[in-house]
Image (cartoon, grey):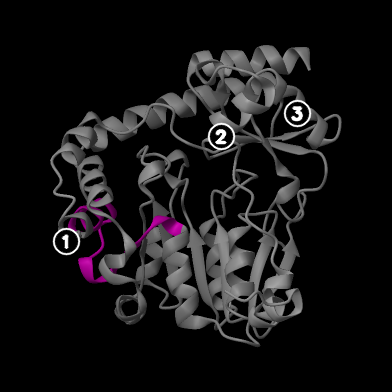
């Protein structure tokens, strides 16, 4: 096979790829084990906002009964989400993680020349989706309490809001989101990935605003991060178009359908784990002086560069998140997932040393 030149290879790629900064995921057990010579079972992972208690026991039973030779049938899953959210099935859309849902939505609305509104710091994948669609992200710094400050700029096609916000943990009020919705013609995507850990949800506003979509996930409170299962509640006119543009079977698997359906059938289990996490969150917040949070993580100001600070935890086998990869977070912030009491004790012991 003949080999092409480097310039030829570059010419085949879309020019916008040069603007992309790859998504930085939290570090995993294997990476830290290899780098520091630690046994994986001794490592505490508090960097990816996972639920340390895992999903309902019903999940493993359900997944064990799947027929992997068959394509997924998501009808029961959609019915379970509809029952959980209180919205009709026609307004429920699903995807491979919330990022999969957002990927399809941006294919519906964004094209070259459009602009998106993204208050920062926040989940960096919003910017990646914007750029790959050929649109331009308008990054707007948050206020001193991480609030969305000011009015939405003109000529915005789509806005990405996160409540509770990742990585800061604060929530938006109904008054704030309504003011933004009523000041723009843009499609507003409200990311509620962490809402089960918060005091309130704004999902019922979808009934009032036909330009609002509220995204959710089963990765966090439901303990199904490995299943990559997200969903959203959207006005019927958007949901109809979504189903036209989405991947076959909405891009999910038999295993994720079974797991999601089972998890949604055992809400008491999920709610018990959420209460444990909220209790530990309060303990950690008091001990560290972190910013108040309504998610399953805390946002810390670091006394030294976050790179060096996080490195000291990693060397002790404790994975936390350096927030430098979040645009607007600066050089002195780290994010810590709330773990089990014993995991949090390990973190606090290292915190005092460091």
State the quadrant of the N terminus: bottom right
Magenta region = 79-98
State the quadrant of the C terminus: top right
Residue 116 location (% of width, % of height): 63, 75
Whether residue 150 is visible: no
Mark 2 or mark 3, earlier in chain: 2
Circle count: 3
Residue at the spot 74% in from the left edge and 74% down from the top edge? 6
Residue 222: image quadrant is top left
- Between label 1 and label 2, give the one nearer the viewer: 2
Identify the element where label 2 is drawn.
Answer: loop
- Between label 3 and label 1, give the one nearer the viewer: 3
Residue sticking out furthest to the front: 1
In-front residue for pair 325/31: 31
Vertical position of residue 288 compared to residue 67: above or below: above
Q: How far apart are the alpha carbons under marks 1 and 2?
A: 33 Å
């Amino acid at each position: 096979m003949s080999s092409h030149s480097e310039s030829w290879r570059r010419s085949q790629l879309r020019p916008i790829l040069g603007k992309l900064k790859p998504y930085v995921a939290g570090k995993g057990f294997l990476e830290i084990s290899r780098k520091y010579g630690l046994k994986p079972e001794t490592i505490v992972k508090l960097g990816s906002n996972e639920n340390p208690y895992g999903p309902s026991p019903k999940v493993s039973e359900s997944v064990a009964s799947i027929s992997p030779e068959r394509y997924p049938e998501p009808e029961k899953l959609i019915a379970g989400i509809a029952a959980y959210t209180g919205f009709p099935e026609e307004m429920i859309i699903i995807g491979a993680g919330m990022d999969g849902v957002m990927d399809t939505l941006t294919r519906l609305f964004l094209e070259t020349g459009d602009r998106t509104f993204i208050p920062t710091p926040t989940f960096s994948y919003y910017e990646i989706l914007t750029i790959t669609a050929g649109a331009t992200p308008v990054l707007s710094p948050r206020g001193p309490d991480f609030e969305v400050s000011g009015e939405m700029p003109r000529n915005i096609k789509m806005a990405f809001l996160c409540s509770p916000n990742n990585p800061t943990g604060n929530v938006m009020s109904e008054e704030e989101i309504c003011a933004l919705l009523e000041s723009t013609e843009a499609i507003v995507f409200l990311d509620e990935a962490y809402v089960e850990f918060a005091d309130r949800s704004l999902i019922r506003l979808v009934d009032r605003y036909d330009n609002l979509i509220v995204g959710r996930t089963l990765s966090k409170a439901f303990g199904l991060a490995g299943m990559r299962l997200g969903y959203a509640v959207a006005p019927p006119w958007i949901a109809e178009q979504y189903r036209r543009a989405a991947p076959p079977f909405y891009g999910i698997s038999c295993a994720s359908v079974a797991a999601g359906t089972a998890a949604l059938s055992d809400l008491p289990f999920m709610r018990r784990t959420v209460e444990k996490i909220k209790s530990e969150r309060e303990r950690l917040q008091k001990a560290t002086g972190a910013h108040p949070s309504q998610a399953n993580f805390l946002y810390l100001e670091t006394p030294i560069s976050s790179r060096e600070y996080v490195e000291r935890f990693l060397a002790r086998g404790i994975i936390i998140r350096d927030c430098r990869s979040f645009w607007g977070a600066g050089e002195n912030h780290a994010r810590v997932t709330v773990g089990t009491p014993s995991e949090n004790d390990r973190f606090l012991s290292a915190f005092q040393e460091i």
